[in-house]
Image: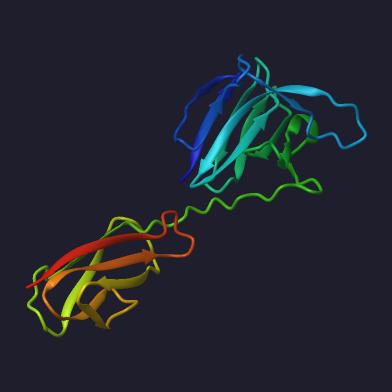
Amino acid sequence: MADSLVLTGVKDVKKHTGTEMLLTRPKRGGDTHSLKEWWKGGGVSTCYVECSVFNVTVGTDTVKLVLDSNNSTNVRIDHDGSFGFTFYGANEVSRAALFTDSFVLIEHYVFPAISGGKVMTVTPAGAAPKPDGTVAETIGTPTVSGNDSPNADTSDLIYSVAIAGGDASTPVYTWSVTGNLTITAGQSTASLTVDSGDAGNATVKCVVSQAGASNTPVEDTFSVTIA
């Protein structure tokens, strides 16, 4: 994913090509946020600057992109989809910064109006870590299938699980049964072998998990009536 837009003034967004960058408004009202001058170190009197603030979201991570803007600002901002930014044609804007969602400084940018050349990226001591923009995999929806009315005392009944949707690359399968069913093979795979015992109600359940997945674990339970 990637995103691009042009900020004109403090609030007008034009030529927006994606959805990752979203201009925010302060809860107190108005068009700009009042933030401490992030480029000044400790021991300096605290001053505030009016800024345009964008929420930038990739997967489950959100950061704040802050620009020291005014009514004459004009700048194109490109986002690479992994919290990397490129600024073009910066006019009437000299600084920007990247913060966590709770406004802890990650890094800041010095534009040509001050640097005299290329945009400089500054990572201050004690800065918060920058998210990598990795989007967590999802498992999808599991569905268990098989014989729902097997005869009593039957061997080698097969139950399988299929996963619809999602993009999990290394799913782990954990099976369990209730009633007069006994697992004989297939634990930790997508296909389970069981034997049936006396007549009665039973279930076959599969729990699918994956470390780091956004919705782990998920499960499905299949009802069985042993005849």
Q: Name which residue lies at 52% across and 23% down.
A: 13
Give the vertical position of 174 relative to 111 (above or below): below
Depth check: give the residue in front, 180 or 223.
180
Give the vertical position of 151 relative to 104 (above or below): below
Q: Name which residue lies at 61% across and 34% down.
A: 88
Q: Position of residue 180 (x, y in %)?
A: 19, 76
Q: Position of residue 135 (x, y in %)?
A: 48, 52
Q: Name which residue lies at 89% across and 37% down.
A: 42
Depth check: give the residue in front, 205 or 1.
205
Depth check: give the residue in front, 207 or 61.
207
Q: Name which residue lies at 61% across and 21% down.
A: 26
Q: How many marks?
A: 0
Q: Quadrant of residue 150?
A: bottom left
Give the vertical position of 51 relative to 152 (above or below): above
Give the vertical position of 131 relative to 33 (above or below): below
Q: Is residue 62 left or right of residue 150?
A: right
Q: Position of residue 5 (x, y in %)?
A: 52, 31
Please state, as top left, top right, bottom left or bottom right, where the C terminus lies in the image. bottom left
Q: Is residue 187 left or right of residue 55?
A: left
